[in-house]
Amino acid sequence: MPGIEHEVVQAIHGRIRMRVPRLRQDGDFATRLRALVSALEAVTDMRVDRAAASIVVHYGESSLSADELQARLVTAIEQAAWLLSKI
């Protein structure tokens, strides 16, 4: 399965914002991604903005590094798309 387009727009201590164009046109994907990201270790708060095609994630830095969280977010994006392809 090809990767889902995404990019890190901003990453500061305890917060990452990613642009995921599929969020804009796919409500089921947004719902699934929200559930997967909310369940990630270290995530303290998150917001999906479909109009801006972005997701903002706040996390506890003591649990994961920014790189580790980013890798888990990319995995969640791919999982959300994969799960929807199986419905």
Image (cartoon, rainbow, N blue to C red):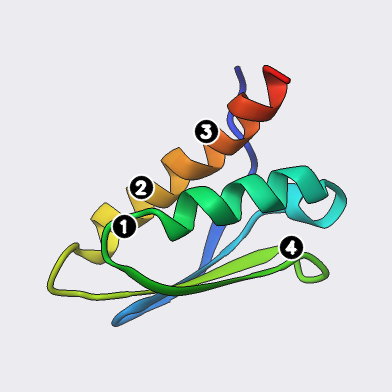
Q: Residue sitting at 87 percent across and 50 percent down?
A: 25
Kind of residue sitting beneath label 4: Ala
Q: Nearer the viewer, mark 1 or mark 3?
A: 3
Q: Earlier in the sequence, mark 3 or mark 2?
A: 2
Measured as percent of width and height from the top left, residue 29 is found at 71, 44
Measured as percent of width and height from the top left, residue 52 is found at 77, 71
Disc 4 on helix, strand or loop?
loop
Between the C-alphas of marks 1 and 3, the distance is 15 Å
Q: Earlier in the sequence, mark 4 or mark 1?
A: 4
Q: Which residue is mark 2?
A: 72
Characterize the local packing of mark 1: few (<14), some (14-19) or many (20 or more) Cα atoms within 10 angstroms.
Answer: many
Q: Is residue 55 left or right of residue 52?
A: left
Q: Residue sitting at 20 percent across and 74 percent down?
A: 61
Between the C-alphas of marks 4 and 2, the distance is 19 Å
Q: Which residue is mark 1?
A: 69
Between the C-alphas of marks 4 and 1, the distance is 19 Å
Task: Residue lying at the far left in this picture: please name it.
Answer: 62
Q: Quadrant of the C terminus?
A: top right
Characterize the local packing of mark 3: few (<14), some (14-19) or many (20 or more) Cα atoms within 10 angstroms.
Answer: some
Q: Earlier in the sequence, mark 4 or mark 2?
A: 4
Q: Quadrant of the N terminus?
A: top right
Is residue 10 visible to the viewer in this orientation of the structure? no
Kind of residue sitting beneath label 2: Arg
Q: Which residue is mark 3?
A: 79
Q: Which residue is mark 4?
A: 53
Q: Nearer the viewer, mark 3 or mark 4?
A: 3
Looking at the image, do the residues carrying marks 2 and 1 touch, with CB atoms under 8 Å apart? yes
Kind of residue sitting beneath label 1: Leu
Q: Residue sitting at 47 percent across and 43 percent down?
A: 76
Between the C-alphas of marks 3 and 4, the distance is 18 Å
Q: Residue sitting at 77 percent across and 65 percent down?
A: 50
